[in-house]
Image (cartoon, rainbow, N blue to C red):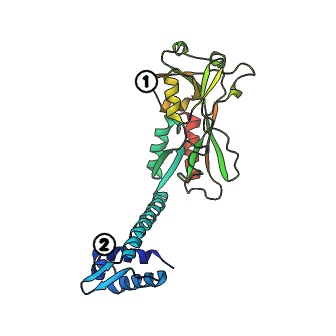
């Protein structure tokens, strides 16, 4: 069966031109390189290199195999780097915002005591967890999936997002009734706004569906719709064309940390404790 040792030997000989130089590049013996290439040729049942008194050159098929071998080795190198990153970084996914104004304090305290934390934006219901992009995820809507462990860490007030020239933007505070009969921008995949916020018959006149933060900001700034979001969004994503105003009677938004139940990251408990503490004291 073909293995990585054989592929590395083949590509080294093709690149260097001789078994001796290939062995130097791979920091091994010439006999080891020769044996690996011979094993690969036997496994495949074809000749890949033409041996000459001056060295070796690939056959037509050998050149094609070597090109594919380089791609395989490049993908393996990516996998190895991912494994290294997992050991010294905590990757935390989010869809709309991380922790608002608490993001930097959390990041600095974690780095001081534990090491690097990397925040990764992913507009999916699991904020990149299901996709394998992160070890922990910050979500602001229920995630009823038994594969994941979910832990409540805090709550955030809601605010309205309005274009700067919207008449409501001149007011310091708003209510849900103020926003009723208006077009409201929603993201069905990751957003926290739905018609359930309003009593029956008092909700938005229209729902403008968007996909992700950038489109939501663009639609609101253009005055095409208003938005309702967590205060964390306002803190983390100020926009020159948007004014954020608190919505006094809107229920707060719960914030959860989520991770794979059968594969919890090493720092999950400590990170959760830090986030809970900062949400509790508001610092």
Check disc 2: other Cα within 10 Å, few if <14, some if 14-19, many if 20+.
Answer: some
Check disc 1: other Cα within 10 Å, few if <14, some if 14-19, many if 20+.
Answer: few
Relative depth, front residue between 102 and 250: 250
Residue 38 versus residue 250 in the image, above or below: below
Q: Distance between the Cα atoms at labels 2 and 1?
A: 54 Å
Relative depth, front residue between 74 and 136: 74
Q: Which percent across, then down, holds residue 146?
A: 71, 51
Which residue is rendered at x = 41% and y = 72% of the image? Answer: 65
Which residue is rendered at x = 71% and y = 18% of the image? Answer: 202
Q: Is residue 238 left or right of residue 129?
A: left
Q: Residue furthest left?
A: 54
Would residue 187 be visible to someone looking at this image?
yes
Local SS, label 1: loop
The residue identified by callout 2 is 15
Which residue is rendered at x = 44% and y = 61% of the image? Answer: 78
Tell me which corner region of the image, top left, top right, bottom left or bottom right, holds residue 186: top right
The residue identified by callout 1 is 240
Q: Which mark is residue 264?
A: none
Q: Is residue 35 left or right of residue 281?
A: left
Residue 234 versus residue 266 in the image, above or below: above
Q: Residue furthest front?
A: 60
Q: Which percent across, then down, holds residue 5?
A: 43, 77
């Amino acid at each position: 069966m073909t293995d990585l040792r054989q592929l590395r030997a083949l590509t080294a000989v093709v690149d260097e031109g001789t078994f001796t130089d290939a062995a130097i590049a791979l920091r091994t013996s010439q006999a080891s390189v020769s044996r690996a290439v011979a094993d690969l040729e036997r496994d495949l049942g074809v000749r890949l290199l033409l041996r000459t008194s001056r060295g070796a050159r690939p056959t037509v098929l050998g050149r094609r195999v070597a090109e594919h071998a380089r791609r395989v080795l490049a993908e393996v190198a990516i996998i190895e780097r991912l494994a290294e990153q997992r050991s010294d970084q905590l990757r935390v996914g989010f869809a709309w915002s991380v922790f608002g104004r608490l993001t930097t304090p959390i990041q600095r305290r974690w780095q001081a005591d534990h090491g690097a934390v990397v925040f990764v934006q992913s507009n999916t219901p699991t904020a990149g967890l299901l996709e394998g992009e992160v070890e922990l995820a910050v979500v602001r809507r229920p995630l009823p999936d038994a594969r994941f462990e979910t832990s409540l860490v805090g709550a955030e007030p809601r605010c309205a997002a309005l274009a700067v020239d919207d008449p409501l933007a001149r007011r310091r505070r708003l209510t849900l009734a103020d926003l009723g009969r208006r077009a409201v921008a929603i993201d069905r995949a990751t957003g926290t706004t739905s018609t359930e916020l309003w009593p029956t018959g008092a909700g938005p006149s229209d729902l403008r569906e968007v996909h992700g933060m950038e489109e939501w900001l663009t639609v609101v700034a253009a005055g095409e719709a208003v938005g309702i979001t967590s205060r964390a969004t306002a803190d983390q994503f100020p926009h020159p064309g948007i004014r954020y105003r608190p919505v006094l009677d809107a229920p707060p938004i719960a914030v959860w940390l989520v991770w794979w139940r059968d594969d919890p990251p090493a720092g999950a408990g400590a990170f959760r404790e830090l986030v809970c503490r900062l949400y509790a004291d508001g610092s």
